[in-house]
Image (tube, rainbow, N blue to C red):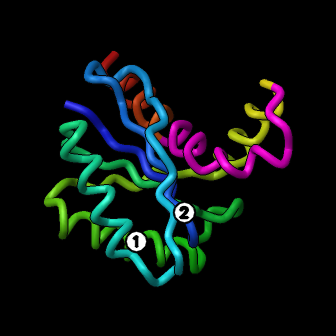
Amino acid sequence: MRILGLDFGSKTVGVAVSDELLITAQGVEIVRRKSPSKLRQTLARIEEIIAEYKVDRIVLGYPKNMNNTEGERCEKTKEFGDMLARRTGLEVIYWDERLTTVAADRSMMETGIRRENRKEFVDEIAAIFILQGYLDYLSNSRS
């Protein structure tokens, strides 16, 4: 069993996958789309990744505002999550993603990745942070 972690954005979707023991999250790729409204190819690629890694659950970053309210991005994320659930038949879990992009950027800065190169990786690393947060939650709830 593996879990897929996604950081859904207007132009990209960062993708991470868990190991089979559900301990660690690893980055897979960033799925890029030509237009925010063009999701067919994005969903098709995610379905390929699900099949390749034998995923049985999806964790989708949920972009609440810092004051815990839900804005337009939450609505778009819910729509995307609903599409994913319909197309894949898998459970989609919404996971608070506040500050994951900030943490991803900080992590890259600490490892010496140049500012101009960080944007290329930030969504994938944010997906790792989202999924790792969920995996840690699972681990702690089993203890």
Q: Earlier in the sequence, mark 2 or mark 1?
A: 2
Residue at 79 percent of width and 36 percent of height: 106
Residue at 49 percent of width and 58 percent of height: 13
In the displayed image of the protein, which residue is found farthest to the top? Answer: 143
* Real-space CA distance between mark 2 and mark 1, rounded to the nearest whole angstrom: 16 Å
Question: Nearest the camera: 130 or 55?
Answer: 55
What residue would you read off at disc 1?
A: 78
In the displayed image of the protein, which residue is found farthest to the left? Answer: 89
Residue at 43 percent of width and 80 percent of height: 38
Question: Nearest the camera: 134 or 54?
Answer: 54
Q: Is residue 100 left or right of residue 92?
A: right
Residue at 64 percent of width and 44 percent of height: 121
Vertical comparison of 139 with 27: above or below: above
Magenta stretch: includes residue 41: no
In the displayed image of the protein, which residue is found farthest to the bottom? Answer: 37
Q: Position of residue 65 (x, y in %)?
A: 66, 65
Vertical comparison of 33 with 48: above or below: below
Q: Which mark is residue 105?
A: none
> What's the amino acid at mark 1?
Lys
Q: Position of residue 36 (x, y in %)?
A: 52, 79
> Would you identify the image quadrant in which residue 41 lies?
bottom left
> What's the amino acid at mark 2?
Thr
Label 2 residue SS: strand
**Disc 2 + disc 1, Cβ < 8 Å:** no
Q: Which residues are magenta?
A: 112-130
What residue would you read off at disc 2?
A: 12
Q: Is residue 93 left or right of residue 55?
A: right
**Considering the image in quadrants, where does the C terminus appear?**
top left
> Would you identify the image quadrant in which residue 20 lies?
top left
Magenta stretch: includes residue 117: yes
Q: Is residue 134 left or right of residue 68?
A: left
Q: Position of residue 100 (x, y in %)?
A: 64, 45
